[in-house]
Amino acid sequence: MPSIRVQLMLNDLGDIPEYHQDDPTISAKATAYFDNGISEEPLAVQLAHFGKKRVARMLKGELLSWLGDLGTAPRIASITITD
């Protein structure tokens, strides 16, 4: 079963705690992102379709964009994908 390990560095918690409590639409988007995922396909299917490098780039882009918008100053130290 494939898995992804991300080492993420945050310089600040930014707006994470208050942002999701104050804005129900942001909370709903966060829930959809983490509970429903970006794709409904299993990770193994996504890896077979896109390849490890592209999946890592897509994940990195999503995390940096989403967490950057929350003012966390994110940095991805590493992404490891195992089969």
Image (spheres, rainbow, N blue to C red):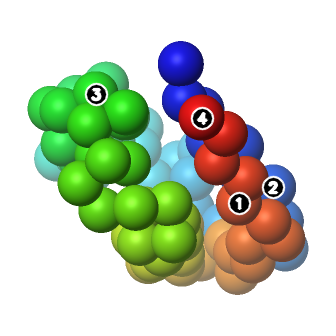
User: Of marks 2 and 1, which one's residue comes earlier in the chain?
Assistant: 2
Residue highlighted by disc 4 = 83
User: Of marks 3 and 4, which one's residue comes earlier in the chain?
Assistant: 3
Q: Nearer the viewer, mark 3 or mark 4?
A: 4
Q: Nearer the viewer, mark 2 or mark 1?
A: 1
Q: Residue at x 75, y 77 (%)?
A: 75
Q: Residue at x 64, y 48 (%)?
A: 81
Question: How crowded is the residue under tag 3: few (<14 C-alpha within 10 Å), some, or many (20+)?
Answer: few
Residue highlighted by disc 1 = 79
Q: Which of the 4 image quarters holds residue 15? A: bottom right
Q: Nearer the viewer, mark 4 or mark 1?
A: 4
Please tell me whether mark 3 sits on a helix, a strand or a loop.
Answer: loop
Is the C-beta separation of discs 2 and 4 under 8 Å?
Answer: no
Residue flagged by tag 2: what amino acid is it? Gln
Please tell me whether mark 1 sits on a helix, a strand or a loop.
Answer: strand
Q: CA distance from mark 2 to mark 4?
A: 18 Å
Residue highlighted by disc 3 = 42
- Seen as rendered, the residue at the extreme top is 1
Tell me if I can see residue 67 in this picture.
yes
Image location of residue 26, percent across then percent down: 27, 50
Image location of residue 1, percent across then percent down: 53, 19
Q: CA distance from mark 3 to mark 2?
A: 22 Å
Is the C-beta separation of discs 3 and 4 under 8 Å?
Answer: no
Residue flagged by tag 1: what amino acid is it? Ile
Residue highlighted by disc 2 = 7
Residue flagged by tag 4: what amino acid is it? Asp
From the viewer's perspective, is 36 left or right of 6? left
From the viewer's perspective, is 63 left or right of 49? right
Q: CA distance from mark 2 to mark 1?
A: 6 Å
Is the C-beta separation of discs 2 and 1 under 8 Å?
Answer: yes
